[in-house]
Image (spheres, rainbow, N blue to C red):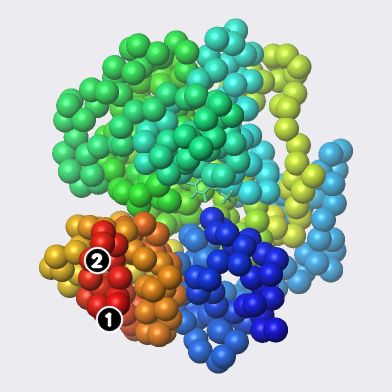
Amino acid sequence: MNLVDRDRQHIWHPYSAVGSPSPIYPVVAAEGVRLKLDDGRELIDGMSSWWCAVHGYNHPVLNEAAMQQLDKMSHVMFGGLTHPPAVELAETLVELSPWGLQKVFFVDSGSVAIEAAMKMALQTQIARGQSQRHLFLSPRGGYHGDTLDAMSVCDPITGMHALFEGVLPKQVFIERPEPAFGEHCTEQHLAQLEQVFAEQGDQLAAMILEPIVQGAGGMRFYAPEYLQAARRLCDEHGVLLIADEIATGFGRSGKLFAVEHADITPDILCVGKALTGGYLSLAAVLTTDEMANDIASGEPGVFMHGPTFMGNPLACAIAKASIDLLCANDWQQQVLQIEQGLQQGLAPAKTFTHVAEVRVLGAIGVVELTHPVDMSSVQPMFVERGVWVRPFGKLVYLMPPFVMSSGDLAQLTDALVDVVANLQIKDGVAVPLSA
Ligand SMILES: *Cc1c(COP(=O)(O)O)cnc(C)c1O
């Protein structure tokens, strides 16, 4: 049996059924911005493995950091022990993150970072004598992960609240953040936000949002003024602000952290994904001295969380090397160049009748179609053109590694535009012209 058939016997892939006939490609190696398939084909990577691989694959500097740490220890428990990789990474995160965030809690994945952030907010409110505040406010269109509490603050439709009705905690939702990035924010745009704080502000533990870029919930970019208004209203109503920068952190939106577009500091900041440059699963929750002190002075005097693989030394060592590399590489220039390449390369798609919008921010380029893509028939069209692009719903999008050359980027955007040009809408879905 070949690898794909063996895979189909046993394995689930993200949001899939075991044994699904939709195409799946065996990858045997990856180097720079190219994925190598087992049949010898090479694909230019347009996804950075879901926001992560900002330096590309098989990077000598990150490999070296991993080897060095492997020779010392790959893991050791974090209860009662500490080690240089965790301390050095924490210091670096505190130094680079927005002013005021001083304390770091390491976890193993983005979803768990959200769980820890939500618990941190609840414990802080309890410690402040505000135990009636147990709700979270979240804008629609958000994505915060797949565990149950993270799901409870995801968009109710894409987050499948109906399916898990009765299990998910019921949170407070408002419309998607408006206006779009680059548009002028009026009182009208903020009216619902003002209203929900006025009506339910005293029951809210925290507001949770993805700053500026809503990722998996729709790939939309919104105005910094919305974020500033959220910060102001949280302050006025004693509500904590959780910024989920798991997708946007480390330069993707054109700022090191997307909250910098609005020049605000959240009470809690979650990072993950690109933290290790895509090498290992690691995430972190940053917060203020004030919150850490409140948690310490409340009942039971400790923060009630502690994953087995907390502060994994191998992951921390690679993360530290990845952040150093980012700074050494002049990531701002890299992201700016990608932004320009995406704007130029994706522009031809604007004229297609089945394209609703083309938008670019930082190293994120989105072609939103008028109808959802039929993945099974469309995925092979990208592979045939030598690129790795994984659409979802109506969105065909790119978030390339920051190290991509302008030549490779032009090939990537040309391939994407060519695929979209060769789609038609049939029975409400986008399928190949030949279908
Ligand atoms: C991916 C993502 C998460 C979840 O991270 P996992 O590592 O997949 O658990 C949470 N929030 C945002 C914004 C994300 O993009």
Mark 2 highlights which residue?
426
Q: Residue furthest bottom?
A: 40
Quadrant in which the C terminus appears: bottom left
Quadrant in which the N terminus appears: bottom right
Q: Amino acid at mark 2?
A: Lys
For the question of whether residue 279 can be seen, the reply is yes
Q: Name the mark on residue 434.
A: 1
| Left or right: 375 in relation to 94 | left
Where residue 284 sits in the image (x, y, percent)? Answer: 62, 44
Which residue is more in the foreground, 430 or 288? Answer: 430
| Left or right: 174 in relation to 119 | left
Q: Residue at x 49, y 67 (%)?
A: 48
Where residue 309 sits in the image (x, y, percent)? Answer: 77, 48
- The kind of secondary structure element at disc 2 is strand
Q: Amino acid at mark 1?
A: Ser
| Left or right: 375 in relation to 326 | left
> How would you rate the neighbour count of disc 2 (Cα within 10 Å): few for under 14, some for 14-19, many for 20 or more?
few
For the question of whether residue 409 can be seen, the reply is no
Mark with earlier residue (1, 2): 2
In the depicted structure, whether residue 392 falls above or below residue 64: above
Q: Residue at x 47, y 13 (%)?
A: 203
